Image (tube, rainbow, N blue to C red):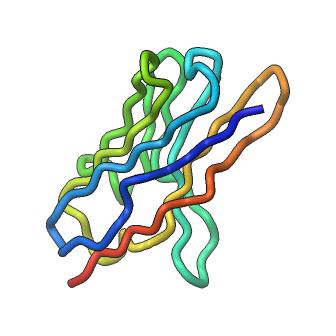
Amino acid sequence: QVQLVESGGGLVQAGGSLRLSCAASRSTVSIDSMGWYRQAPGKQRELVARISSRGSTNYADSVEGRFTISRDNAKNTVALQMNSLKPEDTAVYYCNAFLLRVGSYYWGQGTEVTVSS
């Protein structure tokens, strides 16, 4: 299994930046895919960005060009750099890991991001 702990959330003005970090309990090299999801009040959880073990990435259309996901295998972390934040980015952001061998997804507890207008 994988334990994930997110950090870096907070309150920021529109147009500002935040960097979220997710620390994994095992080597990120052994994790097939990691990603960031978010869930706003009253809405379903949605994909923000994902990164594979090979480093390939994909982003939601709403954040592409503003957010960047990255992995630091030496530190067992995945980060989400969020720039040009908008009020609609307000949500709880969750780190996710997928292990193909086990066929399971794992989730962190989430970190709140609030973007004020």
Q: Is residue 44 left or right of residue 94?
A: right
At x 56%, y 46%, the residue is 5
Name above or below for residue 11 compared with residue 73.
below
Q: Is residue 91 left or right of residue 46?
A: left
At x 74%, y 41%, the residue is 105
Q: Is residue 39 left or right of residue 117?
A: right
Q: Residue 78's x, y, as percent?
A: 45, 34
Residue furthest toward the right? 102
Picture quadrant where residue 42 is located: bottom right
Name above or below for residue 30 compared with residue 110.
above
Picture quadrant where residue 2 is located: top right
Name above or below for residue 52 compared with residue 67.
above
At x 46%, y 71%, the residue is 91
If the image is split into quadrants, where does the N terminus sit? top right
Q: Residue 29's x, y, as percent?
A: 56, 15
Q: Residue 106's x, y, as percent?
A: 71, 43
Q: Viewer-proximal residue, 107 or 8?
A: 8
Name above or below for residue 29 compared with residue 65.
above
Residue furthest toward the left? 15
If the image is split into quadrants, where does the C terminus sit? bottom left
